[in-house]
Amino acid sequence: MTAIVVGVDTGGTFTDLVLLGPGGLLVHKVPSTPDDPSRSILRGLAELGAWRDGAWSQRDTELVHGTTVATNALLERKGARTALVTTAGFEDLLELARQTRPSLYDFMQQKPPPLAPPELCFGLEERVLADGSVERAPSAEAVRRVVEAARDAGAEAVAISLLFSFLHPAHEELVAEALAELDPPPFISVSNRVLPQYREYERTSTVTANAYVGPVMAGYLRRLEAALGAEGSRPGRVRVMQSSGGSVSLGAAAQEPVRTVLSGPAGGVVGALAVARLAGYPDIITLDMGGTSTDVSLCPGRLQETVAASLGGVPIGVPMLDVHTVGAGGGSIAHVDAGGALTVGPESAGADPGPACYGVGDAPTVTDANLVLGRIRAEDFLGGRMPLDRGAAGAALARLAEAMGADVDAAALGVVRVVNATMERAVRAISLERGFDPREFTLVAFGGAGPQHACELAEGLGITRVLAPTTPGALSAYGVAIADITKDYSQTVLLPQDEVTADRLRQGLAGLRARALAELRDEGVPGRRTRLQPLLDMRYVGQSYELTVDCPRLGARVAASAARAFHAAHAQRFGYADDNAPIEVVNLRLKAVGVSAVEQPGAAPPTVSPKGDPLVAEDTVVFAGGPRQTPFLRREALPADAVVPGPAVVLQMDATTVIPPGWTARVDGYGNLVISHVSR
């Protein structure tokens, strides 16, 4: 095992750090520096004691980084000037898209502009047919023309996506080689390397997004590497979290940054499932409520992935954890809209100026509402390192209350109810709408604001158990630290069921397997920690989209076994299956895993001596049923098996947990707070 691993999650408001080593687990938070996240990372490492005088304090320290750099570049449209090279006649592919409307009856909706504008889309005179045969090979002159057009247009990045290149990649490689000879060369993103699959629009969208965020991400990683000096250049010393729930090297992340667009949220899901499994609750719904947004994911005993996600209106076809995000965070701004309705989010006060109680901004936010309701103790915020201004929060809520025609407490309760309703819809979207009953799951609450809202949210969904981990405000950083190293590969095959044989699948997977083993070796993964998981994308013939199932054992009955797995998955997702309908395998997938050597903290001893008196104070807290005298307790002072009846508020450096009336919390053997609804 590596002596020390530091997991870092650079969020919109705070940068969270978790240090795992022989001495146990340490947690730290520092304000984020959105203009250059590496500054907050170095500050946090120094304050944590892991970085001194330009070097690691311990020789064998590793850094695993969950980052929002690619995410923000895509959402804020602050990426590179990007050109697209595609087959002549298909230059308008990104503009035409799929002709679907995100909101069917909204006549005022605005379609987001393509990442590569029409004037930067260039057609190459070439054509590969659907069977992989070449109808027209590109001439050297044709390649030169598109390369010079991209150069003359000032493209900082170029995406290359030609028709059926996943069957015949040579034409794309000719263009890539010519672009690489430019001085200076642009960032080059090639579809047969990033996403060798059919569906030209989704493939082109993904490879264009990769090009769009590429220079931004590569520049940031170079700055981080430079800031870390020789320590950052050592192979394996610094890794980056991917959207799929595993990490890769700095170099791999710089080449395919599109795989990191859900980096931070993925770390939270990985950490939540690891903690919940240890606690004995493998079926969970995760609630990650931070300063800007809330991320939810459903894990039926395992991580669930999707290859049909969209971020900022841009389809992304690479594997990522199935996370649903809504604009509901502690910094979400509350206002009364033109129709007189109270609205919360998606606009956020962010880290700068932040909620009104931070002392800079004046907009009323969810954090201000919780402070006014007494659910946050102003002098204990961030462990007392960042006291909050209750007067400023009250003034902001008073202005909102005046606009609502209500008193301050009613306005603050309204803000909490509205933001809870937004999160409730998100949970229903990833549970009920996908064939799962949320009442059968444990809600794992984390993020700085998650445990404040979890019990009330759970009650609205009929969930009877909430788990607040030991370090809820830094669980994403914890998940980043313990994540495996993963690499994902895919190849379109389009095999009808009668052609699905063990030999055919083995042949198709052989190339993916060879590439995976080589790249894991380059990542420094020893053979004993290498795991390869083959997967199949399957559908009924005539369907537009697929479901991913585990590839069965490659024996004589592989087709029948795969069909059974697909029927079961289809019934779970859509409520029906047709055993007599013909099936086809669309894509072969391979997930290559380098199993993490990081040891997770085990159970606490049966009896733990409390660290002082847990009672900090008693104060009035306003709940839905009215104000109640409520004890405020120090979490680290609660012994194992301690029982905390609601109402109560549990304080710690990285989060605040609110236990409403009708709920009771118990400290389990791992230090988690397991909060149960009393009457259910």
Image (tube, grey):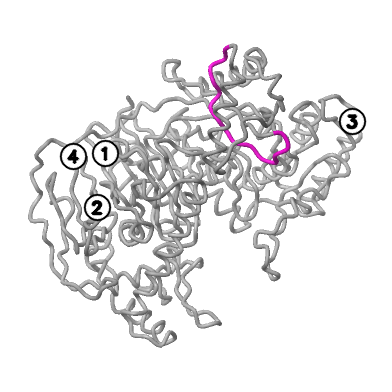
Q: Quadrant of the N terminus?
A: top left
- The residue carrying mark 1 is 279
Q: Nearer the viewer, mark 4 or mark 2?
A: 2
The answer to which of 645 and 97 lies nearer the viewer is 645
Q: CA distance from mark 1 to mark 3?
A: 62 Å
- The residue carrying mark 3 is 140
Against 609, residue 170 (above or below) is above
Q: Quadrant of the C terminus?
A: bottom left
Q: Callout 2, which amino acid? A: Ser
Q: Callout 4, which amino acid? A: Gly
Q: CA distance from mark 1 to mark 2?
A: 14 Å
Q: Callout 3, which amino acid? A: Ala
Q: CA distance from mark 3 to mark 2?
A: 69 Å
Chain-order first, disc 1 or disc 2: 1
Q: Callout 1, which amino acid? A: Ala
- The residue carrying mark 2 is 676
Q: Nearer the viewer, mark 4 or mark 3?
A: 4
Dot 3 alpha-carbon crowd within 10 angstroms: few under 14, some 14 to 19, many 20 or more: few
Q: Nearer the viewer, mark 1 or mark 2?
A: 2
Q: Which mark, residue 669? A: 4
Does the magenta-highlighted stretch encompass residue 100? no
Provide the residue span drawn in magenta. 541-555
Q: Position of residue 348 (x, y in %)?
A: 47, 66
